[in-house]
């Protein structure tokens, strides 16, 4: 399975190579090609590899990524894409003028990071709602759905992309009243001016599948819409592999329901 992912990624990289000077062709999956702002939308799609989509690269070594300054974040050492960070800083400054303080709680998370979270929940090392899911939910599909209530399956998280950030609080209740409500209302009105969109909007008729609403999760559209498009064209459930419980990916159709099950305004 892993071999087929690598083979597909290689094909994508080779296709990119046909249109680019050889000096800019990446030599391995840890160094995907930087994105030029002058590229057209379809060229942008082509310039990302499937390894990028599934988070199999190191953000700390990627030329398009930058470390987030501690004063803008809840902790040191988080990374995100530079273009998304520039837009975030503009948005943060504008918010500050309106009395709103935006803080990044989580940014880029590579495949291996997500794998360690997922597997701990899958094998019961980490309890979910006080339960050891390996015992209470032996069925792979049911166990995966339960974990997906809180955590992405490795290879399917938008946090792999460096375009997506969690802001201020991971508690839905925080955004229902007081300062939290003000923050969310400000973001709903203004984030779009800086390229940011809320991919996990309320679930219902318009968005029936995927994660529950996340008022804290914002995505930098000028880049992430291209990654969503690439996922739609090339990513398959079979490519979501290399971790315990990966057999559930196909059973629940994780690509259609979770990767592509986002707010239509963010596509
Ligand atoms: Zn998030």
Image (tube, rainbow, N blue to C red):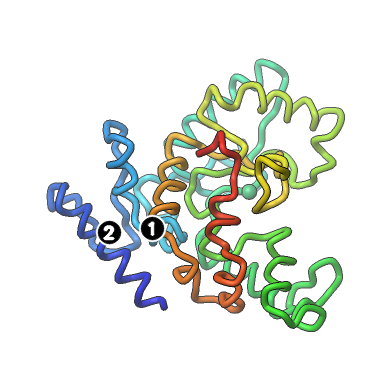
Q: Which residue is mark 2?
A: 12
Residue 89 locus on image (x, y percent): 53, 29
Which image quadrant for residue 180? Answer: top right
Residue that sits furthest to the front in the current view: 205
Would you say 58 lies left or right of 262 here?
left
- Residue 134 placement (x, y as % from top left): 75, 81
In front: label 1 or label 2: 1
**Which of the two discs, 1 and 2, labels the residue nearer the N terminus?**
2
Residue at image position (38%, 58%) is 234
The residue at the point 45 percent across, 40 percent down is 225
Q: Find out whether the residues at labels 1 and 2 contact each other: C-beta distance under 8 Å.
A: yes
Q: Could you say whether the residue bearing mark 1 is in a helix, strand or loop?
A: helix
Q: Residue at x 59, y 79 (%)?
A: 244
Residue behind mark 1: 234
Q: In this image, 70 relative to 2: left or right?
A: right
Neighbours of disc 1 within 10 Å: few (<14), some (14-19), many (20+): some
Q: Is residue 14 above or below residue 223?
A: below
Secondary structure at badge 2 equals helix
Q: Give the image location of residue 146, x and y in percent.
A: 74, 66
Image quarter hosting the N terminus: bottom left
Quarter where residue 13 is shown: bottom left
**Residue farthest to the top, as pictured:** 97
Between 224 and 23, which is closer to the camera in this rendering?
224
Binning the other alpha carbons within 10 Å of mark 2 as few (below 14), some (14 to 19) or many (20 upward) gives some
Q: Disc 2, ligand 1: is the CB inside 8 Å?
A: no
Whole-Å distance between the Cαs marked 1 and 2? 10 Å
Residue 264 is left or right of residue 227, and the answer is right
Number of numbered callouts drawn: 2
Compared to residue 75, the image places residue 127 above or below, namely: below
């Amino acid at each position: 399975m892993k071999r087929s992912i690598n083979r597909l990624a290689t094909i994508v990289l080779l296709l990119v190579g046909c249109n680019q000077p050889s000096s800019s062709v990446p030599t391995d999956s840890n160094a995907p090609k930087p994105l030029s702002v002058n590229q057209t939308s379809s060229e942008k799609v082509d310039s990302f590899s499937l390894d990028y989509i599934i988070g199999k690269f190191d953000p700390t070594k990627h030329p398009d990524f930058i470390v987030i300054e501690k004063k803008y974040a809840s902790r040191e050492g988080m990374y995100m894409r530079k273009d998304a960070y520039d837009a975030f800083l503009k948005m943060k400054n504008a918010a500050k003028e309106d009395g709103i303080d935006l803080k990044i709680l989580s940014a880029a998370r590579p495949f291996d990071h997500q794998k360690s979270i997922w597997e701990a929940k899958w094998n019961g090392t980490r309890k979910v709602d006080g339960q050891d899911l390996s015992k209470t939910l032996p069925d792979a599909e049911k166990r995966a759905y339960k974990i997906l209530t809180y955590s992405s399956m490795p290879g399917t998280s938008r946090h792999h992309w460096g375009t997506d950030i969690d802001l201020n609080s991971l508690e839905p209740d925080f955004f229902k009243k007081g300062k939290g409500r003000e923050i969310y209302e400000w973001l709903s009105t203004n984030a779009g001016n800086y390229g940011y969109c809320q991919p996990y909007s309320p679930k219902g008729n318009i968005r029936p599948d995927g994660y529950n609403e996340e008022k804290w999760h914002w995505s930098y559209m000028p880049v992430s819409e291209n990654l969503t498009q690439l996922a739609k064209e090339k990513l398959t459930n079979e490519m979501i592999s290399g971790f315990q419980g990966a057999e559930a990916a196909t059973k629940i159709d994780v690509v259609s329901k979770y990767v592509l099950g986002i707010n239509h305004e963010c596509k």
